[in-house]
Image: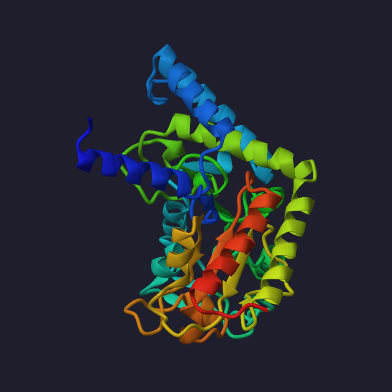
Amino acid sequence: MLPESLRSYIAFAVTLTLTRRPVLYFDHNATHPLSETAKRAWLDAVEKFPANPSSPHRAGQRADAALQNARGRLAVLLGCGADEIVFTSGATESANAVLAQFEDVSVSAIEHPCVIESVRGKSARLLPSAATGVVALSDFSERTPHLVSLMAANNETGVLQSWRETLAVCREHGVKFFCDAAQWIGRMPAAGLGACDFVSGCAHKFGGPQGVGFLKCPANFPPLLRGGPQEEGRRAGTENVAGVLAMVAALEECEAAIRDGALDARLKWREEFEREFTAALPGARVLGAGVARLWNTVSVIMPETADCRRRWVVVMDRLGFAVSTGSACASGKEKPSHVLTAMGVSPQDAGRALRFSAGWGTTHYDWRALLDGVKDAAREMGVALA
């Protein structure tokens, strides 16, 4: 007979297994899980192209040929020349590389921290955001910077930015334009982004592997990382051949889905969730409501509760939903999100911000389950439902 302690442990483990909910993942804006297409491409590349693409032997030449093929495929999707693509470790490195080259810059107040932090100490002007989360650049009446930086889609709210119009204004005044497209690429059509002077992208936002991305830049772009002739002298370091091939395969799959009209149904699922969410929870609101946003992103301010320390994201996690939070409570040590602050959201409200971000594998049923999970969390937090 088994010892009593072991029987108790087994009973506990069985109960936990039977009662535990499967986790529904709604944090794709942080990282999209690796797609099967990307995984197959990565494994295939590891098997076929193990050599350093800078090596002169045949194995190295085969790896380099595969890398150049991927570069050309990515250039076609963006609408630029293959010689304008530099492979990097991700959007953060790409942003740092661009902003290191300019001293007088204008950046939107809602940019990703990799942009905001890169301009500290420079002659930088913040372009204000409207309460909707939209940043508009009409002219350069106050001053003409060397570079303007405006993201294509915001990572916290999903609000789409007027990057095409901003590019046109920059062209008119001879100003360089940098577009952080990390959240746009793989969710919206990439075509046209190649017209920007600089564009950054990140594989793990659309189903590719972590630690690989790209920068669209001029052929004579000076390197941030030095120490080797790779990427035509624009980025030193051995290229991640398998990661690049997996990234391009994942993006091509996303682009095919977009061309096939996959966004329409997913946008309806998001809109349905928002309608029922606001109807069920009095006092809650959707950030960026009424303006164009990514089909996968819903950023909300949850209703007030008696105890702010019981954060919504923690309760949602325990109920089986992986979601993200905009900031800590105003009484905590963390500062409110700079994006929400730029939108005029108070620190108290920002402390109740949640972000739900879906992926390509998220179903209509998952959105419905998320709504039920939000209601369960509200009940546990003592919030009355409508």
Q: Nearer the viewer, residue 247 or 63?
A: 247
Determine if residue 46 is in view. yes
Q: How is the image coloured?
A: rainbow
Determine if residue 235 is in view. no
The quarter in which the N terminus is drawn is: top left
Residue lying at the far front of the rendered structure: 1
Occupied quadrant, residue 292: bottom right
User: Looking at the picture, how far across and down is residue 279, in whole percent?
Assistant: 71, 75
Q: Check the image and report above or below for 3 versus 201.
A: above
Q: Nearer the viewer, residue 346 or 14?
A: 14
Q: Check the image and report above or below for 142 versus 37.
A: below
User: Looking at the picture, how far across and down is residue 113, in whole percent?
Assistant: 44, 66
User: Looking at the picture, how far across and down is residue 161, in whole percent?
Assistant: 66, 67
User: Looking at the picture, how far across and down is residue 115, in whole percent?
Assistant: 46, 65
Q: Check the image and report above or below for 39 versus 280.
A: above
Relative side of 211 to 265, left or right: left
Q: How many marks?
A: 0
The quarter in which the C terminus is drawn is: bottom right
Give me the residue at 63% from left, 34% from top.
Answer: 73
Q: Nearer the viewer, residue 371 or 140?
A: 371
Occupied quadrant, residue 37: top right
Residue lying at the far top of the rendered structure: 58
Q: Check the image and report above or below for 145 versus 358.
A: below
Give me the residue at 64% from left, 84% from top.
Answer: 141
Q: Nearer the viewer, residue 269 or 279?
A: 279
Occupied quadrant, residue 268: bottom right
Give me the residue at 70% from left, 41% from top.
Answer: 255
Give me the residue at 39% from left, 14% from top.
Answer: 57
